[in-house]
Amino acid sequence: MTLTQTLPTAGKYLTFAVAQERYSVPVLKVREIMRLCPVTPVPRMPSFIKGVINLRGKIVPVVDLRERFSLGAAEDTERICIVVVQVEEPDGGSRLTGMIVDVVEEVSQFQSDDLEPPPDFGDAVDARFIVGMAKTRGQVKTLLDIDRLLGFVGHIDVRALHTRSAEL
Amino acid sequence: MADTQVNELLQELATEMAFLLPDSAQGLTVMAAALGQLQQLPSVTASADAMQELALCLALCQPAVGAGMTAPQLEKLQTAFERMANALYVVQPAPEASATAQPSAQTQPAQVGPVAPAEGDSEGDAGRFFIGPDDDLELLNEFCNEGRDLLSQVEQGVLVLEENPRHKDTLNQVFRAFHTFKGGAGFLGIAPIQLLAHHLESMLDLARKDQLPIDPTVIDVILAGGDALQKYVSAMARQLAGEDQGQAIFVDTAELLLRIEACLRGEPAPVFSAATPPPATDLPPATAPAEPVALPAMEPEPQPAAVLQRDDKPALVMTSSAPPAAAPRPPPDKPADAVKAAPAAAAGQAGKVAARAEALANFVKLDTHKLDALVDLMGELVIAQSMVVQHSLVQELRDRELDRHLRQLSRITTDLQRNAMSLRMVPIRSTFQKMNRLVRDLAATQHKQVQLILSGEDTELDRNIVEELADPLLHMMRNAVDHGIESPADRLAAGKSAQGTIELHATHQGGGILIRLRDDGRGLDTQRILSKALQKGLITAEDAPTDRSIFNLIFLPGFSTAEAVTDISGRGVGMDVVRGNIARLRGRIDITSVLGAGTTFEIFLPLTLAIIDGMLVGVGQERFIVPTLTIRESLRPQPHMVSTVQGKGELIRVRDKLIPLVRLSDKLGLVSQVRDPCEGIVMVVDSGVRSRALLVDSLIGKQEVVIKSLGPTFKHQQGMSGAAILGDGRVALIIDPEAVSQLGSAAEMVS
């Protein structure tokens, strides 16, 4: 597998939480953060694809990260947000996709010292969506490869990942 | 390289020359300077002819700097310049400016062009060049795009010239088009194109100066030239798109060049026995007369009489330029050819020509993404505006002035939206123009006399539709000429005029557009169609179809095959493809025909693909849009109408027809309160060939919506053809009734 070649780069990252975990994506990928609005479901799609929303005249698909990671429903629904990111297609195009997250936390600068390549999960499929890990102020954040995460249609189980990253 | 310089200078001079005006000093300074530079170059001094003309040019130019020259002087200058340019083009070893162009035959004797260059002729160009890795692909691409525009200008110009050979503006325009072509090719160093364009330009220049009458021969040569350039451009575009890379781009222009030269010398065009270059509109082989290849050897069948006989294999000795053998060569000042419109009221004709020449005016090119973004934003503006206007606080204010302002705001936003929508609309003219050319070429190859009458070319519709419509229309037009219109002899025998008439008419009708294609040919033979359909098992003997449904049989896939219907309709690619194309544009097509009197096709299309008229329906908690065009009727079924067939599902009897019931909630995996069909609404939709009854919970209303794509995430999604944003800003999905009825139930999918 040729997945771990891209090392995470230093820069500004947006951090959000899904369940107990914190994830970060490069700020430059983020187009918009909005309150959860009514999502029109699209029938006959995998459950993690919640449906579509109207983003200023554009139809944007919305992915529920909790569903994507096979986690249960959120208890605290007050601060649920949709983070709209720009996903690069393998063919060179790009499209917008929304991710439903529990809460958006902060934008912070990650130095290259804070960053680490993804831990070796062995055969865990989960690793393919992870660019690396960031450790700042005692917290571990998972850097997501959203191009793969939102481009890949399939099932991910991050519970194994959680136990592993807790050991770090 | 000195020769590059010569080229560039000539280019520059030719451009200046094209814009020189009598009694105006504009451009003369530049000309004089460039001529002066030219005089210094060794490759110019080497040619005595060129030097002589150059001196003449200078003598004319220098005194005029700052003062301008009279019209006769200007003419002299142009002649001298052309002669000089010709002399220099001959001197040059063709494509020196290019790193890419293949050296011409002179430097590469091993060239294997199919036509050997004529003896003693300096244009031994094999018409071959390469696109290499070092080339500026962006520039080449730009050249191709521009080239296409120019060629369509040429083609439209030629059509004007056919009717009015002396239309000065059009002559100038065609001249300039070739000139720009030459300039572009010269800049990129594509010698074969440059040479051809130069020849064509010289020819047009003579015509511009009234030294060469525009007769059918010249028109044919111009068209052939346009075709050759077109082939170059398409070949380049293909390579730029990544196909057949590294291959030589070759178009056989040797013969064409000789023909142009003949025209330039004022001689009748030489007759070549080789098969002529096929007409631009790549006709399927079946269109060509049955055995075109063997013909040159054959004795030319003499005379109209022979040709006028009913013959499916017209024995023809088509030379590329000669007018159809059946038509005696008209006197040069009265060009008439087979397709030429009947000499209508001369005044009206002149007005039409002027209008058409005018229509060749400029327009702005725009990225369609920008247009789409504009339309998106307009839609959002309308939603935002209605949210403000309908906001409860605003409603409570009940202020007169505010009311007025809000109404004004609504009016402006609606107008703006309509305007933004209309930006996508273009006149159908361009598609219609292609027909002109097609009919002209087809009639000539088939020795038929056909008059094409176009009307309503200014009717506007969505750009995409105009483009998509071209293919089906071309196909139907071919059928009309091929199979509809009889040969002149047959027509006379049937008591009709020898000249057949095809009318192509576009008009707005009921919120859409109607395109009518009518010919006065032999019409459809219901008996033959019927027996053919029986034979193919498309219908059974018990069916007693009406005339109308018999005509519709020709749209069935498998009906029209080459051997079956040569003189009824279609060949190979059948009318089923035409109907498919039109259905994809959400339109429909009807036929009426009277045996012996002609056939009429009527195509109804929506004005735009961007908006549909939709029925908003409720299913469970969700709202969906069903395209109104597909709904035949909506009703609330009575208990006696519903029946269940074991193993086949539910059926609804509507007007004595049993229609399968499709529960949308099941197909879409939604929870619906309505289990008994009698509590819901049934919509009878025509999907493809069969009718279905879609069961929904409720009808909410009818509205026009802007269709949006669901995007790549949902590309595997079936059953939805898109999405639309409703008045409250929320998204509703648009149902594709055909696809949705073919889905299995959602419950099955999950399990």
Image: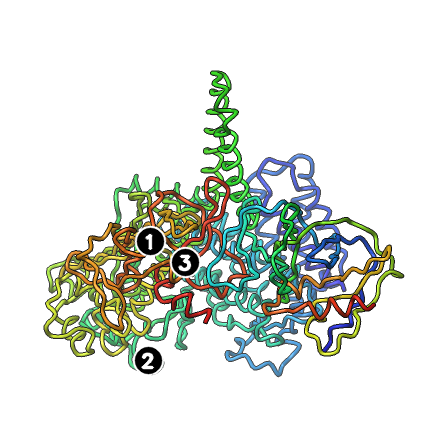
Left or right, B307 with respect to B729, comes to: left
- Which is nearer the N-term, disc 2 or disc 1? 2
Could you tell me which secondary element the residue under label 3 belongs to? helix
Looking at the image, which residue sits at the far right? Answer: A113
Does residue B500 appear in the picture of this structure? no
Residue position marked by numbered label 2 in the rendering: B295
Name which residue lies at 44% across and 64% down.
Answer: B718
Relative image position of residue B446 (x, y in whole percent): 28, 68
Amino acid carrying label 3: it is Glu
Along the line of sight, which residue is nearer the eye, A149 or B695? B695
Q: Residue B667's quadrant in the figure?
A: bottom left
Relative image position of residue B651 (x, y in whole percent): 23, 63
Contact between marks 2 and 3 (CB within 8 A): the answer is no
Relative image position of residue B152 (x, y in whole percent): 47, 55
Q: CA distance from mark 2 to mark 3?
A: 37 Å
Along the line of sight, which residue is nearer the eye, B582 or B718? B718
Name which residue lies at 76% across and 66% down.
Answer: A131
Left or right, B263 with respect to B606, comes to: right
Residue position marked by numbered label 3 in the rendering: B468
Residue position marked by numbered label 1 in the rendering: B674
Amino acid carrying label 1: it is Val
Relative image position of residue B558 (x, y in whole percent): 27, 74
Looking at the image, which residue sits at the far top? Answer: B400
Along the line of sight, which residue is nearer the eye, A120 or A33? A120
Amino acid carrying label 2: it is Leu
* Vertical position of residue B415 compared to residue B309: above or below: above
| Dot 1 crowding, Cα within 10 Å, few <14, some 14–19, many 20+ | some
